[in-house]
Image (spheres, rainbow, N blue to C red):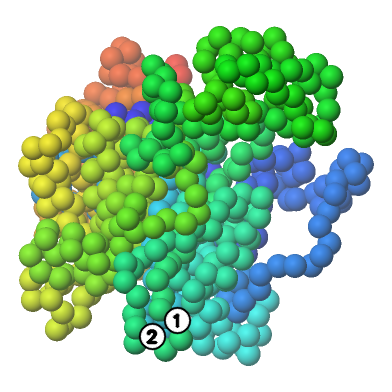
């Protein structure tokens, strides 16, 4: 089980987080494009902010001058219509609720699973994940829609009205009209506006040694490179990988047969030195032995390759005579030297580390044994289909699982599994917020089955409708997320049925499912009109809109799940129920936080709560209250008794 944050950390989160829907809406209506940057700076360099949270620009500039900081003044940067708006989106808090799929999650194969599948808008999902998973994700792989004119049109809902845009961005009517012209378009600006906030939020989720891989084709490869430079920093660029996606050319192509796609890789924090091991995991261990490894002298240490034993530049103690096994004498060529001095050479000679050719007379070459290549081969930037699969293979994989072609452009499992081997270890968390057909989840389970790992996946996929006349619709699947979830189930069953795999006891072939739900307008109206003195407002009508009857989910389930994630708990946290007479509360033990969400809290329940805390039967540091379940009198009674009757009263946080 992943533990929640420590008490102090959790309390800090509670103080800073906009706790309820009403506060979130107020925040979202007042943000500026640089809010996100300022919040980051407050954490990183608090000395440049005054007590009111105002950035001291003059002090910052003065410090830069004093420290002789080098500035880049070339003026080179990425600009596009919608960039300011995209920055504005990054600072918004999510106003959606996280609804657990209670029926699915309670099944035997899912109830203890750490894998997560979220149905909903990935921008909203990334906003929710910030509090619980920031700095926790080791690897992100995404396959966003390619901007071919068919796969992508910008359909994000504009989250601000014209007056808010004028206030936040300083836009005039013409600029607002230009921004809104992106809607339903597939232009470069529209695609970049769509991708920018998602990548900004994704960057925050990566651990310091984390990496992101993004698949793309020629339509946006150049723009994506600039965008990733902007978001991650040019210094954190790792590689542009060419993946050979097809195994046979298209002879009817107009100019060239398109045989490849690109995969761009960036690090959260690129390797700074040889001693910095943060990105060493990029090295790949694999069974395929390169052709240059052999064993012509039957060395008992096994296969080896050889390298030149000379180097540039004269060094006196590295220039000496070497006598080959047949008596031939060798000295370094003019201007060169041996790699090691004579003492180290003689030690290595005793260890049979040199190859003098089959006749024993050649220049010495230094052996490198395959068994000593502990982390395998450094992967190159061209990936051939023989090693990582191709698009036809990917289609065959999904067709076999479903017995019909339900998905048009899946990625091969071998491709994602190869990336996982490069960039993850056995207990890492893997995120894919363009889940598509669910290949990443399939690959995570497959690799865990092969190496005994317990990597966890988080998949996010919009419940986008499939075409009415598609094979997927004929097979009974109405949305893409439904295909992905079914693919995960079938892939897990296939892996379990593979007689060639001895599965570890910790193999996880299940997943928890959650939906992102936008509160109904009538609930938002009730919230805005809420009067704590009006007892008629209280009862289940302030919780019922959060329920999801199709999956057996109550409003309490939704509210508690949403608040736990927003408070920094991960999805696999264990929450206890606590009874105070007939009243049920919810308790996060590690942080000693008590959630009072249910209506009908009364004097008897209050007395029992005070009694358990007073007798040290229950430790409570924080009480979080859903204010719409408490009328004015009940709230007042609770607060006054907590304050006056306990020696160390817990902090009370009210959320609307």
Left or right: 177 with respect to 614? right
Quadrant position of the N terminus in the picture: top left
Tell whether 220 sits left or right of 328. Answer: left
Horizontal side, residue 204 vs residue 397: left or right: right
Residue 234 higher or lower than 623, as above or below: below
Q: Is residue 522 shown left or right of residue 547? A: right
Residue 280 at x, y percent in the picture: 52, 35
Residue 12 placed where, x, y %? Answer: 52, 35
Q: Position of residue 297 (x, y in %)?
A: 43, 23
Q: Are marks 2 and 1 in contact (CB under 8 Å)?
A: yes
Q: CA distance from mark 2 to mark 1?
A: 6 Å
- Neighbour tally class for label 1: few under 14, some 14-19, many 20 plus, Cα within 10 Å: few
- Residue identifier under label 1: 256
Between residue 491 and residue 498, name the one nearer to us: 498
- Res 504 quadrant in image: top left
Q: Residue at x 46, y 39 (%)?
A: 292
Residue at image location 35% in from the left, 75% down from the top: 249
Badge 2 is on which residue? 253
The correct choice, above or below, for 118 with respect to 641 in the image is: below
Q: Residue at x 42, y 68 (%)?
A: 260
User: In the structure shown, which secondary structural element does the residue marked by tag 1 occupy?
Assistant: loop
């Amino acid at each position: 089980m992943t533990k929640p944050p420590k008490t102090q950390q959790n309390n800090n989160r509670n103080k800073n987080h906009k706790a309820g829907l009403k506060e979130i809406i107020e925040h979202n209506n007042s943000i500026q494009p640089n809010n996100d940057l300022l919040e980051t700076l407050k954490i990183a360099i608090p000395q440049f902010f005054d007590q009111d949270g105002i950035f001291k620009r003059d002090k910052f500039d003065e410090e830069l001058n004093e420290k002789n900081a080098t500035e880049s003044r070339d003026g080179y940067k990425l600009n596009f219509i919608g960039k300011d708006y995209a920055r504005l989106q990054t600072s918004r808090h999510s106003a959606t609720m996280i609804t657990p799929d209670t029926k699915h999650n309670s099944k035997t194969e899912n109830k203890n699973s750490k894998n997560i599948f979220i149905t909903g808008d990935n921008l909203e999902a990334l906003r929710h994940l910030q509090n619980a998973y920031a700095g926790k994700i080791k690897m992100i792989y995404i396959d966003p829609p390619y901007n071919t004119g068919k796969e992508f049109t910008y359909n994000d809902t504009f989250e601000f009205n014209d007056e808010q845009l004028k206030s936040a961005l300083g836009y005039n009517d013409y600029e607002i009209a230009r921004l809104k012209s992106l809607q339903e378009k597939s232009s470069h600006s529209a695609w970049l506006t769509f991708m920018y906030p998602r990548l900004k939020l994704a960057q925050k989720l990566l651990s310091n040694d984390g990496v992101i891989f993004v698949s793309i084709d020629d339509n946006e490869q150049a723009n994506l490179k600039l965008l990733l430079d902007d978001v991650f920093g040019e210094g954190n660029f790792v590689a542009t990988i060419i993946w050979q996606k097809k195994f046979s050319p298209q002879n009817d192509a107009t100019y060239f047969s398109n045989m490849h796609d690109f995969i761009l890789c960036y690090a959260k924090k690129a390797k700074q030195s040889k001693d910095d091991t943060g990105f060493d995991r990029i090295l790949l261990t694999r069974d395929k032995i390169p052709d240059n490894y052999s064993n012509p002298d039957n060395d008992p240490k096994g296969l080896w390759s050889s390298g030149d034993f000379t180097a540039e530049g004269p060094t006196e103690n590295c220039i000496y005579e070497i006598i080959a096994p047949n008596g031939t004498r060798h000295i370094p060529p003019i201007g060169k030297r041996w790699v090691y001095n004579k003492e180290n050479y003689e030690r290595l000679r005793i260890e049979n580390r040199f190859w003098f050719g089959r006749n024993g007379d050649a220049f010495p070459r230094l052996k490198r044994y395959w068994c000593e290549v502990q982390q395998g081969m450094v992967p190159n930037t061209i990936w051939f289909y023989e090693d990582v699969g191709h698009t036809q293979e990917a289609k065959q994989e999904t067709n076999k699982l479903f017995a019909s072609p339900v998905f048009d452009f899946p990625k091969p499992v071998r491709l994602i599994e190869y990336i996982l081997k490069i960039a993850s270890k056995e207990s890492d968390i893997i995120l894919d917020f363009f889940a598509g057909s669910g290949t990443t989840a399939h690959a995570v389970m497959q690799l865990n089955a092969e190496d005994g790992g317990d990597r966890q996946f988080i998949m996010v996929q919009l419940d986008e409708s499939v075409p009415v006349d598609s094979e997927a619709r004929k097979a009974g699947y109405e949305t893409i997320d439904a295909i992905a979830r079914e693919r995960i189930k079938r892939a897990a069953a296939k892996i379990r049925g593979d007689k060639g795999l001895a599965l570890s006891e910790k193999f996880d072939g299940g997943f928890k499912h959650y939906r992102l739900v936008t509160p109904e307008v009538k609930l938002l109206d009730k919230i805005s009109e809420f009067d704590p003195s009006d007892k008629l407002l209280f009862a289940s009508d302030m919780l019922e809109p959060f329920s999801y009857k199709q999956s057996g989910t109550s409003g309490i389930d939704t509210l508690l799940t949403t608040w736990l994630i927003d408070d920094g708990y991960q999805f696999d946290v264990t929450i206890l129920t606590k009874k105070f007479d007939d009243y049920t509360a919810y308790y996060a033990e590690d942080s000693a936080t008590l959630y009072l969400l249910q209506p009908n809290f009364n004097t008897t329940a209050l007395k029992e709560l005070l009694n358990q805390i007073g007798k040290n039967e229950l430790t409570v540091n924080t009480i979080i209250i859903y204010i719409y379940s408490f009328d004015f009198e009940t709230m007042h009674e609770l607060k006054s008794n907590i304050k006056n009757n306990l020696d160390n009263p817990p902090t009370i946080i009210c959320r609307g």
